[in-house]
Image (tube, rainbow, N blue to C red):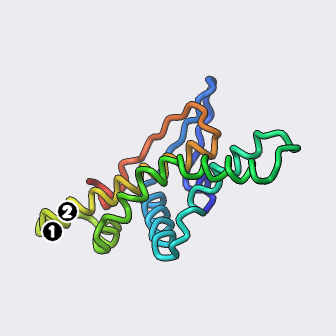
């Protein structure tokens, strides 16, 4: 997924990347991505970009074994692997389905809580991927109000 396709970049005079995010675009795309990763079991592909970037900074003459170790280390240290993925795996399946629709007054408290957690995992995962895409430079994100579907 091209994470930058989910945002509108705003021109700014300073060195900060300013992004505007439409929740009706971002949340469904991120939830689909997260569910595909969970269902495929291909967890490492979600963070391989971090490992690849770490290896790209190494001199070309480094032995392949060292490059592989650096790639694995950087991939495994990703906040996605350490924080967001375990939370995503711990959520009930219906949390993701609930997250794609508005919370209703008759929704049980447990389901409402799981829905909010799913939305928060999707937002945090998205933010991390966006930050990686600009090489951890300063950024600000404005998530538009939207149509209340994705309100916690």
Q: Secondary structure at mark 2?
A: helix
Q: Quadrant of the N terminus?
A: bottom right
123 left or right of 63 in image: left
Mark 2 to mark 1 CA distance (whole Å): 6 Å
Judging by the rendered image, the residue that carries numbered circle 2 is 112
Q: Position of residue 120 (x, y in %)?
A: 34, 52
Label ID, residue 107: 1
Q: Is 3 or 143 nearer to us in this picture?
A: 3
The image position of residue 72, as x and y in percent, is 63, 53
Q: Toward the viewer: 86 or 131?
A: 86
Residue at left offset 31%, top offset 61%: 149
Task: Tell which of 58 and 22 is nearer to you.
Answer: 58
- Proximity of marks 2 and 1: CB atoms separated by less than 8 Å: yes
Q: What residue do we see at 69% from left, 44% from top?
A: 54
Q: Position of residue 88 (x, y in %)?
A: 38, 62
Q: Quadrant of residue 106?
A: bottom left
């Amino acid at each position: 997924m091209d994470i930058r396709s989910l945002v509108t970049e705003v021109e700014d005079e300073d060195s900060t990347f300013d992004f505007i995010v439409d929740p009706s675009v971002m949340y469904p795309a991120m939830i689909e991505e997260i569910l595909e990763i969970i269902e495929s079991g291909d967890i490492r592909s979600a963070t391989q970009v971090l490992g690849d970037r770490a290896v790209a900074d190494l001199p070309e003459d480094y032995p392949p074994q060292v490059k592989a170790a650096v790639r694995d280390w950087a991939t495994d240290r990703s906040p996605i692997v350490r924080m967001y993925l375990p939370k995503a795996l711990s959520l009930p399946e219906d949390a993701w389905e609930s997250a794609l629709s508005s919370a209703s007054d008759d929704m049980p408290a447990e389901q409402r809580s799981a829905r909010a957690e799913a939305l928060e995992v999707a937002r945090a995962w998205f933010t991390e991927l966006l930050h990686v895409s600009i090489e951890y430079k300063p950024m600000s994100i404005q998530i538009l109000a939207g149509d209340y579907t994705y309100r916690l």
